[in-house]
Image (cartoon, rainbow, N blue to C red):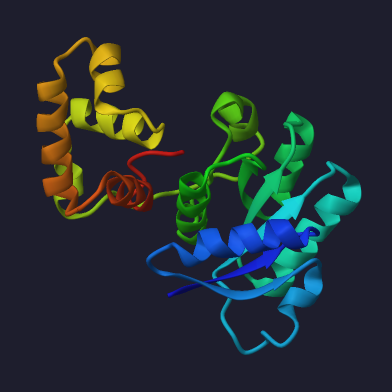
Amino acid sequence: MKRVVIIAPSEVTRAGLEAVISSGPDLVVAASSPDESALDGLVDVKVDVLLLVLMHHTEEALSAIASLSEQAGAPLVVLTDGFDPAWSGAALRSGARAILSSEATSAEILLAIEAASLGLLILPGTASDTLLAEAPTQVHSPPAGNAQKLTPREMEILGMIAEGLGNKEIAWRLDISEHTVKFHIGSIFTKLGAQSRTEAVTIGVRHGLIMI
């Protein structure tokens, strides 16, 4: 089980994030607090991911990211409002591994936690080019087993599944039949050993096949 610590100023927000994390198959909330006191008493407990809600893009927020990252020895997933390229780049350098919109879906949050725990970077799709220039270099091991055998088309469809597209939307975008899409998805599931679309995306992120 991966232990997640939640730090969010709003009690309502914390309750919502606790519910999201509890829905993850291998995640558990280790602590939840409005501030760094969430780490109190966890000295002998391994923290896998810190989920941090930041409302303002300030120098103080960057200092908090750096301090929490060092204190916990764990990657940070940051939920924040709006997008500031300079601040987001500095946040990545300070120890954040994922930067998500505060309006991110439950699935996006769960996938970001999984990816961050594996050392992957999760960047806003519209900001990837800007942030990648600021991000530390990542070296990924090649995917193992049948994951290596995904065809270019299957990789493309897996990426679209990660975007939340349904079969009809994928078929329309690729100009292929819905039946063909279903065939490719079945093949993806078989090769990745996945039982659902979410699990397939999670495995894809884990092996570095896709980035959300």
Q: Is residue 132 left or right of residue 160?
A: right
> Residue 137 in the image: x percent, y percent?
55, 44
Residue 200 in sight:
yes
Residue 73: percent from left, percent from top = 64, 71
The one nearer the camera, 4 or 15, is: 15
User: Residue at the spot x=35%, y=28% of the render?
Assistant: 165
Give the quarter of the image for residue 30. Answer: bottom right
Q: Is residue 75 visible?
A: no
Quarter that holds the N terminus: bottom left
Q: In the rendered view, does 157 fall on the left or right side of 211?
A: left
Above or below, 127 against 72 in this view is above
Q: Quadrant of residue 187?
A: top left
Q: Residue at x 71, y 38 (%)?
A: 89
Position of 165 compared to 103: left or right? Answer: left
Residue 54, percent across and down?
77, 50
64 lies above or below 202: below
Instruction: Give x and y (percent) for residue 114.
Output: 45, 57
**In the figure, is residue 176 to the left or right of 34?**
left
Relative to 84, say whether 113 is above or below: below
